[in-house]
Amino acid sequence: MSVLVFSTLETVHSVFAMHVCYHYLVTKYFQPLALLKGTWSADTLPALTGLIVVVTQVFFARRLFLLNRKFAIAIVLAMGLLLGALGFSVACTVEAFIQPDIFHVQNLQWLSIAALALIIGADMLLTTLLTFTLYRSRTGFKSTDSILNVLIFYTINNGLLTGTLSVVSLFMAIYYPHSLITDGLNICIAKAYANSLLSVLNHRHFLRNHGRQGIDTGLATSTTQGHCRYHETENGFHNRILQV
């Protein structure tokens, strides 16, 4: 159900982004002054982008909490940063509808800067803690450690991609406040976060099936050797990792 809701949200974001491109690059192509006026789809994108980022990070925060509840305070801090980012993103959308033209909107660029800074902070915090937790969860079981290595790889790569885009967008918002570069990058940021979540969900099913096959094979081999308890323990830990 949550995947359906997230996919619907991502689809709506894509439709709005396509409408922005069609409006400015096709309908108003020979009217450069049209860039001074916002359109309803462009004005709504900041709030949608913030919502996608928050939903994605809540998924990873939940995963971290299930793996290690000792980081509950850090997770609450990350959630506070994300809620603040969502608030600034919604404020950007509200101001975009209120202001008469793009110049007045860009005078409030500090809203985007604040939202991006909070997103970067939450992203760095969750990625670092999740990577640390997965690394410390190594047990010596070959199949489980192999799965953990893949999860660490995806965690670092996803965090690096989304973090890099957010930092670049923040840099552009600070040094080029009166341009549309940040708006274009923010669309890419939403797609990067969406892809990071969907890639983890897709590979979780693959790893679950792959890992079970490895454990079943090992269990069948070691049953004749009297080491069933070892593999039952491995199976239980393996299932707990993949439940998140």
Image: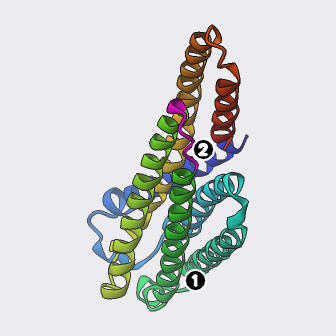
**Circle 1: residue type:** Glu
Left or right: 220 as drawn, with respect to 170: right
Mark 1 Cα-neighbour bin, 10 Å: few <14, some 14–19, many ≥20: some
Which residue lies at the image location 36% right of the left edge and 63% below the top edge?
24
**Circle 2: residue type:** Ser
- Residue 229 lies, with reference to residue 186, above or below; the image says above
Closer to viewer: mark 1 or mark 2? 2
Q: Nearer the viewer, residue 138 or 130?
A: 138
Number of numbered markers: 2
Residue 146, image x, y percentages: 47, 35
Sequence-wise, which precedes: disc 1 or disc 2?
Answer: 2
Quadrant into which the N terminus falls: top right
Q: Which residue is mark 1?
A: 95
Q: Nearer the viewer, residue 206 or 211?
A: 211
Disc 1 to disc 2: CB gap under 8 Å? no
Residue 27, image x, y percentages: 36, 58
**Which labelled disc corresponds to residue 87?**
none
Task: Give the CA separation, mark 1 to mark 2.
Answer: 27 Å
- Residue 212 lies, with reference to residue 18, above or below; the image says above
Residue 69: name its quadrant: bottom right
Query: What span is colored magenta in the figure?
Result: 137-143
Within the magenta stretch, is there residue 142? yes
Q: Which residue is mark 2?
A: 7
Residue 231: name its quadrant: top right
